[in-house]
Image: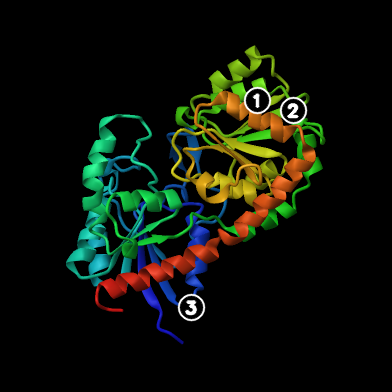
């Protein structure tokens, strides 16, 4: 059997989407992996600033693969700030570990990214950077940030032997920054496809609808995300109202600072009883939410990818997304398994909703097509591309 590649993954914290992929990597015949976490946020209960509540994911994040926690020495520990993750133990782990390659997922906006990257470079370890960036545009809309990124990102990504990117828009962005194709690999942004489809198949849709107080034959639109301004949930509420599909319902699965405003607006529009707010919904409870819905809408103005689209489609729920949602470019064919509309165009979103919700047979076909699309956007493709990226990093380092 071919020799296994021993690979260290450096991650800011356990992620509910990544952990199942790590488990699959641990079973791969060509990989011997270890994951170094800079914090256990998510696996342990902690305040989520966006949801505004304490969150702990209810699916196992730390089993089935080798991992270590590297002590965070930051005086101000936490996610979302450069000095929130300072993990000096990464230097020893990278420099002394017998790794063929180091994959860094922490992001350059953390001090620990630079610790791990410097150790890999200094000790001659092939270095792979993972990034979900798909645009220079920042979430906060500040005009100076794209100019800075245009200058600094080529320098940062130029440090890596190989850059792994989860979307075609990300690949296009890296090319625009001067990263050559021989150093770029598309590693699809995926979830645990088998888990989602299996869970969805066990859902009693009629029972879900009864629990919601929604008629089984009613058309249901789903918003599944944090209720944050850049997710533009108000666009969906306005479009749902404009669509005017008799007997239709709108479900918000998520929480955040806009909830009170949305509830007030739904009431003022006379939509009480047809708009439902479920609050934060943990992972294990999401398959019934997707199966109980007919179509999901993600009207975000900032969404590098949006794996809720993966989840919905695996559950047979087509999606309507804006042209700012990375997943749309890779997963959605308009009119076949969903729709893509210009961000902020409420009239177009309303028209898409009206067209979809008025034809139950169309929705059924779109749901089937959504599931079929996901057959080739799965952990299998992700891990295969990663192995190729590791092999290329060794070739470029003169060790392949």
Q: Residues within 10 Å of mark 1 (few under 14, many from 20)?
A: many
Q: Earlier in the sequence, mark 3 or mark 1?
A: 3
Task: Indicate which disc residue 81 carries.
Answer: none
**Disc 1 or 2, which lies upstream in sequence?**
1
Q: Quadrant of residue 309?
A: top right
Residue at 46 percent of width and 48 percent of height: 44
Indicate the position of residue 306 as horizontal and vertical percent values.
50, 44
Judged by depth in the image, the label closer to the viewer, 2 or 3, is 2
Query: Is 300 positioned to the left or the right of 287 in the image?
Result: left
Quadrant, the C terminus: bottom left
Residue 240's disc number: 1
Quarter-of-image position of residue 67: bottom left
Give how far apart the Cα atoms at labels 1 and 2 are: 9 Å
Q: Residue furthest left?
A: 122
In this rendered view, identify the residue nearer to me: 110 or 150: 150
Q: Is residue 65 visible?
A: no
- The secondary element bearing badge 3 is classed as loop
Residue bearing mark 3: 29
Q: Are marks 1 and 2 in contact (CB under 8 Å)?
A: yes
Separation of residues labelled 3 and 1 (CA atoms): 49 Å
Q: CA distance from mark 2 to mark 3?
A: 49 Å
Q: Position of residue 149 (x, y in %)?
A: 26, 42
Which label is found at residue 248?
2
Q: Residue at x 59, y 16 (%)?
A: 264
Quick one: label 3, few (<14), some, or many (20+) residues within 10 Å? few
Q: Is residue 229 above or below residue 395?
A: above
């Amino acid at each position: 059997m071919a020799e296994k590649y021993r690979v260290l993954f450096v991650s800011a914290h356990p992620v509910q989407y990544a952990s199942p992929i790590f488990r699959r990597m641990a079973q791969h015949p060509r990989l011997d992996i270890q994951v170094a976490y800079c914090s256990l946020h998510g696996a342990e209960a902690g305040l989520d600033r966006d949801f505004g509540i304490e969150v702990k994911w209810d699916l196992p994040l730390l089993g089935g693969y080798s991992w270590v926690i590297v002590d965070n020495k930051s005086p101000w520990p936490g996610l979302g700030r450069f000095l929130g993750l300072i993990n000096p133990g990464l230097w020893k782990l990278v420099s002394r570990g017998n790794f063929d390659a180091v994959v860094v997922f922490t992001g350059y906006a953390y001090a620990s990214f630079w610790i791990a990257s410097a150790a890999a470079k200094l000790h001659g370890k092939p270095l792979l950077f993972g990034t979900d960036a798909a645009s220079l545009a920042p979430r906060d809309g500040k005009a100076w940030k794209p100019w800075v990124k245009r200058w600094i990102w080529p320098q940062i990504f130029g440090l890596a032997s190989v850059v792994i990117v989860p979307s075609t828009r990300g690949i296009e962005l890296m090319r625009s920054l001067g990263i050559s194709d021989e150093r770029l690999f598309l590693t699809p942004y995926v979830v645990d496809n088998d888990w989602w489809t299996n869970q969805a198949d066990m859902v009693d849709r009629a029972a879900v609808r009864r629990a919601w107080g929604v008629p089984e034959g009613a058309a249901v639109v789903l918003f599944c995300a944090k209720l944050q301004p850049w997710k533009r949930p108000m666009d969906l509420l306005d479009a749902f109202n404009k669509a005017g599909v008799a007997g239709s319902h709108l479900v918000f699965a998520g929480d955040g600072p806009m909830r009170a405003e949305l509830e007030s607006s739904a009431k003022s529009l006379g939509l009480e009883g047809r708009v439902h707010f479920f609050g934060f919904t943990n992972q294990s409870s999401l398959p019934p939410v997707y199966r109980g819905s007919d179509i999901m809408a993600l009207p975000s103005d900032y969404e590098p990818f949006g794996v809720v689209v993966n989840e919905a489609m695996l559950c047979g729920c087509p999606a309507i997304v804006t042209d700012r949602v990375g997943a749309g470019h890779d997963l959605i064919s308009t009119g076949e398994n969903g729709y893509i509309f210009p961000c902020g165009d409420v009239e177009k979103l309303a028209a898409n909703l009206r067209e979809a919700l008025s034809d139950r047979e169309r929705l059924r076909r779109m749901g089937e097509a959504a599931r079929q699309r996901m057959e080739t956007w799965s952990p299998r493709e992700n891990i295969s591309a990663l192995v190729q990226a590791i092999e290329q990093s060794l070739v470029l380092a003169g060790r392949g």
